[in-house]
Image (tube, rainbow, N blue to C red):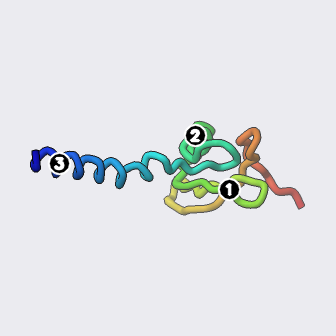
Amino acid sequence: MNKFAIVATLAVFNLAAGAPAFAATDTIFDHTEAYVQQDIAAKGFNVTGVEGWDELIVATVVDEEGHSSFEFFDPDTIALVRWSS
């Protein structure tokens, strides 16, 4: 009976320790981070990260030469935002 109690205790401990990893889902403007990154990548961008920034989504993208830059997207349409002066 002692061996069963030890195994059961370890199993419960392992499940409890792993639960936060399953529960943690990052969202950006009510969309999962993975969805936003996938949607931007489908538009032809090599995306390495996304996050919410003020009222926009900012994506870190890498160009053909390997240079990183930031591109900004509308959170509702996931359309590229171009700045005009």
Sequence order check, earlier mark of 2 and 1? 2
Instruction: Please state which of the two labelled residues, at mark 3 or mark 2, is closer to the viewer.
Output: 3
* Left or right, 53 with reference to 84: left
What residue is pinned by disc 2?
A: 35
- Residue 9, percent across and down? 23, 51
Q: Are marks 1 and 3 in contact (CB under 8 Å)?
A: no
> How much space separates mark 1 and mark 3, taking CA atoms?
46 Å
Helix, strand or loop for disc 2: helix
Sequence order check, earlier mark of 1 and 3? 3
Callout 1 crowding tier (Cα within 10 Å): few <14, some 14–19, many ≥20: some
What residue is pinned by disc 1?
A: 52
Quarter of image, res 68: bottom right
Instruction: Please state which of the two labelled residues, at mark 1 or mark 3, is closer to the viewer.
Output: 3
Callout 3 crowding tier (Cα within 10 Å): few <14, some 14–19, many ≥20: few
Q: Amino acid at mark 1?
A: Gly
Q: Amino acid at mark 2?
A: Tyr
Vertical relation: 49 (above or below) 45: below
Residue lying at 58% horizontally and 37% vertically, measured from the top left: 42
> How much space separates mark 2 and mark 1, taking CA atoms?
13 Å
What residue is pinned by disc 3?
A: 5
Q: Amino acid at mark 3?
A: Ala
Residue lying at 75% horizontally and 54% vertically, measured from the top left: 56
Callout 2 crowding tier (Cα within 10 Å): few <14, some 14–19, many ≥20: few
Q: Are marks 3 and 2 in contact (CB under 8 Å)?
A: no
* Left or right, 43 with reference to 10: right
Q: Quadrant of the C terminus?
A: bottom right
Quarter of image, res 52: bottom right
- Residue 35, percent across and down? 58, 40
- Residue 30, percent across and down? 68, 44
Q: Nearer the viewer, residue 14 or 62?
A: 14
Looking at this rendering, what residue extends furthest in the right direction? Answer: 85
